[in-house]
Image: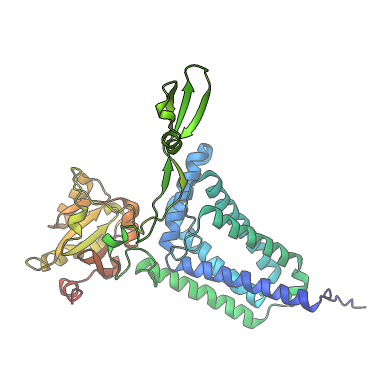
Amino acid sequence: MKTITRKPQQTPAVQVLNHAVRWFVGVLFIFSGLIKLNDPVGTQIKLTEYFEVFAADLPALAGLFHALIPAALVLAVVLCVAEVVLGVALLVRYRLRTTLWVLLGLIVFFTFLTFYSAWFNKVTDCGCFGDAIKLTPWQSFGKDILLLVLLLWLFAQRHRLDSGKSSSAGGVLVGASVAVSLAVALYAIFYLPVIDFLPYKKGASIPENMKLPPGATPDVYVTYYTMKNAATGEQKEVSDKEYIDTGIWKDESWQITATSEPRLVQKGTKPKITDFAVSTPDGQDITAQVFEGNKLLIVIADVQQGNKASFAKMKELIAGLEGKNIQPLFLTSSDEATFEAFRHEYQWSAPFYLTDATVLKTMVRTNPGVILLKDGVVLEKWPAIAIPSAETVQKGLL
């Protein structure tokens, strides 16, 4: 005799709640995954930061984490695709139990990372929503805790949510989400992000983004003095403001015995760009000169890992701009000797200057990449796979 298993009954209110939670979690995972797939190199940079932190904090496993760094881009794509696909699977209830198990594992992993970032103040931006939405470490941790609670609820309610079968239509949607996610990721890797959320995006003024916005408040720091009373031996700690306001500095019986490093007591608003700096190989700062007139920045974060086919096109590009009103220059984080060797090999006649590697990867995600500036404003950006001709660059000024 066949036994019929019935789903547990649920009230209309619980039914609505279950579906609301399922849709909220699914849509949030899809949104988070797509935002990061728009810029998988940015996620790669964040994963690399975590690997470097763990390598330093866990010396016994340093070799493992260092070995993971070259695979960071692949891992970034896999994680981001997984977020989108699992979100879609949750919405269509495709293999729901398996989907919920994997989502739980994923959110536990993310919760650990964000807690580690917040508690130890290691990676101050987890990149949960890429560069589109910035969250503090504690905000990221709070978001993951909320998702963990909601997923635990869904897991407890899985028998009521499960349709009992995985439809072919659901399988098609999940398969399509894999294909679309991979296509978005590959386009962003080989070209540029579909939507550029970075402060060096087309139309942005780099010097303006380096300034505080009107009405913004800077960080507030306080220095503390350890004071000792020569007569009574009493000791106490006072802030620099208290030191002045209370007039204790006038009392000769109180002497400063120690001075603390300035402590951040209130975070202010920071400029969108805080670390852009360009210098000559001998250390001279020429940042301001980069913003004068028309400049073509040829960005090569690391010449040894750059696209060699793109390098071969640089000579013709630079030669085509001779005598024009556009000055080409290289920005690199490679050391002088290494870059000079490559410049000689490819016969690049433009000067080169030094910039931090992370800044260069933020400016343009491919290595190399080309940026056209007019008085510090980004007019055009080109990836390594589409190095422009001199004529195309000149048209960019029009």
**Residue 87 vertical position relative to residue 223 in the rendered view, above or below:** below
The residue most toward the right is: 1
The quarter of the picture where the C terminus appears is bottom left
Picture coordinates of residue 266 (x, y %)? 47, 48
Q: Is residue 21 left or right of residue 252?
A: right
Picture coordinates of residue 237 (x, y %)? 50, 30
Q: Is residue 363 left or right of residue 123?
A: left
**Residue 111 vertical position relative to residue 7 in the rendered view, above or below:** above
Most foreground residue, 305 or 222: 222
Most foreground residue, 374 or 171: 374
Task: Give the image quarter of residue 88.
Answer: bottom right
Instruction: Name the residue located 44 percent from the left edge and 20 percent from the top edge.
Output: 253
Picture coordinates of residue 308 (x, y %)? 26, 60
Picture coordinates of residue 275 (x, y %)? 32, 52
Instruction: Name the residue located 32 percent from the left edge and 61 percent from the top edge.
Output: 209
> Is residue 319 in view from this perspective?
yes
The residue most toward the bottom is: 169
